[in-house]
Each structure stands twice: as structure tokens, then as C-alpha cells.
Amino acid sequence: MRIILCGFGVVGQSFAKLLESRSEDLYARYGLKPRLVGVFDTGGSAIDSSGLDISKLIDAKKNHNSVKKYSETENNASGTEMINDLEAEVLIETTQSNYNDAEPGMTHIVNAMKRGMHVISVNKGPLALAFPSLMELANYNQVLFRFSGTVGGGTPILDFAKNSLRGERIVSFDGILNGTTNYILTNMAGGMSFDDALSDAKQKGYVEADESLDLDGLDAAAKLVILANWIMGMKVTMPDIKRTGIRKINSDDIKRAEEKNCAIKLIASCDEELKVEPKEIAVDDPLCVSGTLNAISFTSEHSGTQTIIGRGAGGTETASSIPVSYTHLTLPTILLV
């Protein structure tokens, strides 16, 4: 199966490494021999219909900051040109999430679907702004659209709710969907100021290049949109979310919460309204996790509340969801879900 990879940052490179390290396992377990035939980053592209050398790709990115130096002849093809010109069965979209117009990921996904490619996306922008229409486009073109890595990184939040709770009616859910803000709030509970906690998170690489995506709740809101559409059957986009970030949380707020045996967490909730806001959570609540962990509780009609917890911040964690989605594209028993 031929793959086009758009985006070769932390997640894209982590996926390529995972693909290389798991190649024997993918063949032994599923009979798959995936190969990257095209890779695009902001500097250019690398193309080889017989399959790109992943180690050589990583070296080109490390030494020249772009895959266009993969071969002696530089390739400046855009992601869209590559999708339109190359023959491939799968597009993997890992470019940076953009909540203004979802580009370039939106164009990549739309063009790939129109060409009959299955799509795996860890880019939240297109789903946050146009989830209902993208699902309609996938159905119209009879292609599969997978996006489990957009929520929870490698923690299978979407698959858990969709498959493990099949037969149940989920009536509401709430949880911590952004590992970065949880890390900051955890450090503030440990005595750090907001500025120091933010600086520490940046040093560890947890904060998006545009910090407002984390701090102002945009990332959590995007994940809430995806969950509400996929799990609850809603047809909503980012403007439907009421959103408050964590910038105004200070040490006094933290202390007041502690006096109530609570901790402040940025909670995304789907009940009567769709909201992202800081809330006081009891320390013995399963949602009250620390560090970069994500946690989400689903309340269903008959089974009560069930919580899933896992790591939420990190390129490798997110990339690990892609091989799972990839096998889901090819196994008949899973295609039915």
C-alpha cells in the first residue's frame, strides 16, 4: 500500500520511524507492506514511487531542515501537487492544526478524498471547522476517514467510546483533553507561578508554537468538536463551543481549590452545552490526573460512568495512533465498525 505523508515535523517523523521499526510486524500480522512514496514539509517534497528510504528522509530533515534535500535534485512540489500527481492509496495528514481556515490540511484531505484515497489525519483543524462536511465527502467518494490520533494522542479515546461502549447510549462526557494545560496547572498546584509553569512547559516542548492554542482552550475545543460529532452524532464546529482558557488562573485560585480538597483543571464537557473552562475537580475524582495526562469520563444510560486515562502530550504518543488507524483501513473485520 502506497502512502503520501503530508507534514514531517515531530509527529510525521515519529510515524515514519514507527513504520520502519514495525514493518516486519505489520507484514507478519496483517500481510501489509506499506511504503512512503511521497513526503511533504514546509520546505519541499521527497518523491519515489518505489518507496522512500526513511533513514535518508530523517537525515535530510535533520541536516537541511527539509526533505527536499532527500535527493540531488531538489523537489519543490507542494502537498497538493503531490496528492494530485502521485498514485497512492492512503494520505496521512500531520501538518500543523490551523483553526482559522484549516489550511493546508483541509485542501490536502479534500483533494485526496476526491482522488479516492483513504485518509488518516492527526491534524485537528479540518475536523474542528468542517467535521460534518468531511464525513459526507468521505462517504460520497467511498473512502475511509480515520482520526483517532486527534484526541488523546496514542490513548484510544475515540475508539473506546465508539466501540467499547457500543450498544450503550452515551448521554454526556467531560474530561481533560489538553495535556499541556494540565501540566501547567499541576505545577501551579505544586507552588509554581503561572509564568514559571508556562516557561517550564515550553522548555519541555509541551507548548504549541502558538501558545494560545493551549492556554486559551482552542486545542481542547477542537477535540470537543470531534468527540461531539463522532460520539454523540452532533453536527457542530468550533463556533458552537463556549470557551475560557487558563490565563487568568492564579495562585489564589489554586489555594481556594485546595481548601475544598479540589484541584483546578481545564475541563471540556458535553452535556446541555458544549464548554471548555477551568473547573474545580475533587482530588479523589478519576478525572483529577496530574502532569500531561488526559482523562475523560463517559456517562451512559445504563452502564454509569467510565473513565479512560492516558498520556496526551507528545509526538511519539500521537504518531503511535497512526499505525492503528492504518491497520483499520485494511482489515475487513474492522472496516465494518
Image: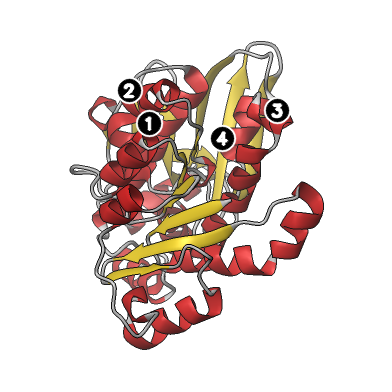
Q: Position of residue 259 (x, y in %)?
A: 48, 47
Measuring 28% from the left and 65% from the top, which residue is drawn there? 209
Neighbours of disc 4 within 10 Å: few (<14), some (14-19), many (20+)? some
Q: Name the residue beneath numbered marker 4.
A: 158
Nearer to us in this view, 319 or 51: 51
Q: Earlier in the sequence, mark 2 or mark 1?
A: 1
Measuring 62% from the left and 17% from the top, which residue is drawn there? 300
Q: Earlier in the sequence, mark 4 or mark 1?
A: 4
Q: Position of residue 212 (x, y in %)?
A: 24, 54
Q: Name the residue beneath numbered marker 3.
A: 164
Neighbours of disc 3 within 10 Å: few (<14), some (14-19), many (20+)? few
Q: Amino acid at mark 4?
A: Leu
Visible in this render: residue 314?
no
Q: Name the residue beneath numbered marker 2.
A: 236
Q: Is residue 222 above or below residue 201?
A: above
Measuring 40% from the left and 17% from the top, which residue is drawn there? 234
Q: Amino acid at mark 2?
A: Val
Q: Name the residue beneath numbered marker 1.
A: 225
Q: Are marks 4 and 1 in contact (CB under 8 Å)?
A: no
Q: Are marks 2 and 1 in contact (CB under 8 Å)?
A: yes
Q: How is the image coloured?
A: secondary structure
Q: Is residue 80 above or below residue 198?
A: above
Q: CA distance from mark 4 to mark 1?
A: 12 Å
Q: Are marks 3 and 2 in contact (CB under 8 Å)?
A: no
Q: Is residue 168 above or below residue 198?
A: above
